Amino acid sequence: DSGVTQTPKHLITATGQRVTLRCSPRSGDLSVYWYQQSLDQGLQFLIQYYNGEERAKGNILERFSAQQFPDLHSELNLSSLELGDSALYFCASSDAGLAGVGELFFGEGSRLTVL
Amino acid sequence: DAKTTQPNSMESNEEEPVHLPCNHSTISGTDYIHWYRQLPSQGPEYVIHGLTSNVNNRMASLAIAEDRKSSTLILHRATLRDAAVYYCNHVTSGTYKYIFGTGTRLKVLA
């Protein structure tokens, strides 16, 4: 158990819909990262937050947005869903400070299926 | 963005050592080298990291080239449970973009 909790574990929805994925980081971790992993693909970095502020952005689509709340949990919002958005979405947290990146602890992922 | 190059797949016999290579030619002097692995149907898990010196922990050893442009993850005795995709990466200083490459799929043969 990494200490990172992601909900829901599985989600099935239709094209055009909007979903929200939630991540609770390990206690005390200020950094949260979101990744997308499509079938048999690598991990695509989406976005990173540190203590509520966006710190780095990867190839995140404009239809996707995220935020980190004062209690440090994070949500990834996916809208106008397309079939190609079907993937595993991982959240990771880290206790590294502003100086750099420490060990990432990953959740078990949220599997999104868009029909 | 940081870029790493790894072989797509490797095979090893059970209880034999495995050397997983990684090239990271864009690394800068202050970037740590990290290795993670992803077991089937699980999220990635941390394996080891280092800066310049070789590192050992209970899971593996990390050998870093003198010029830091490459590294090798060493599993001293592969077990069937080590079958996974192994990723090496580094964070480009100042960007905080923790980017994973395509990884090496390790198959362990009984």
Image (cartoon, coloured by chain):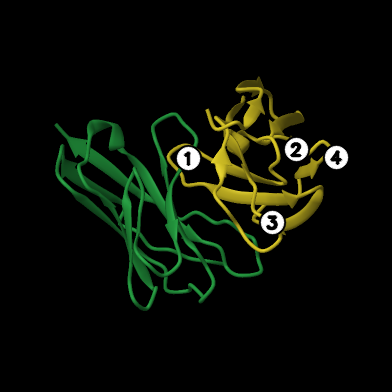
What separation in Å lies between label 2 and label 1 (alpha carbons)?
A: 19 Å
| Residue A80 spot, x, y in % from top left | 75, 36
Q: Say which chain tag 1 marks.
A: B
What shade does chain B have? green
Residue annotated with mark 2: A74
Q: What is the three-letter code of the residue carrying label 2?
A: Ser
Q: What is the three-letter code of the residue carrying label 1?
A: Pro
Name the front one of labels 2 and 4: 4
Q: Is residue A55 left or right of residue A34?
A: right
| Disc 2 secondary structure class | strand
Mark 1, residues whose alpha carbon is within 10 Å: few (<14), some, or many (≥20)? many
- Occupied quadrant, residue A89: top right
What shade does chain A have? yellow
| Disc 4 secondary structure class | loop
Indicate which disc residue A97 carries: 3
Mark 3, residues whose alpha carbon is within 10 Å: few (<14), some, or many (≥20)? few
Q: Say which chain tag 3 marks.
A: A
Q: Earlier in the sequence, mark 2 or mark 3?
A: 2
Residue annotated with mark 1: B44
Q: Is residue B37 left or right of residue A73?
A: left
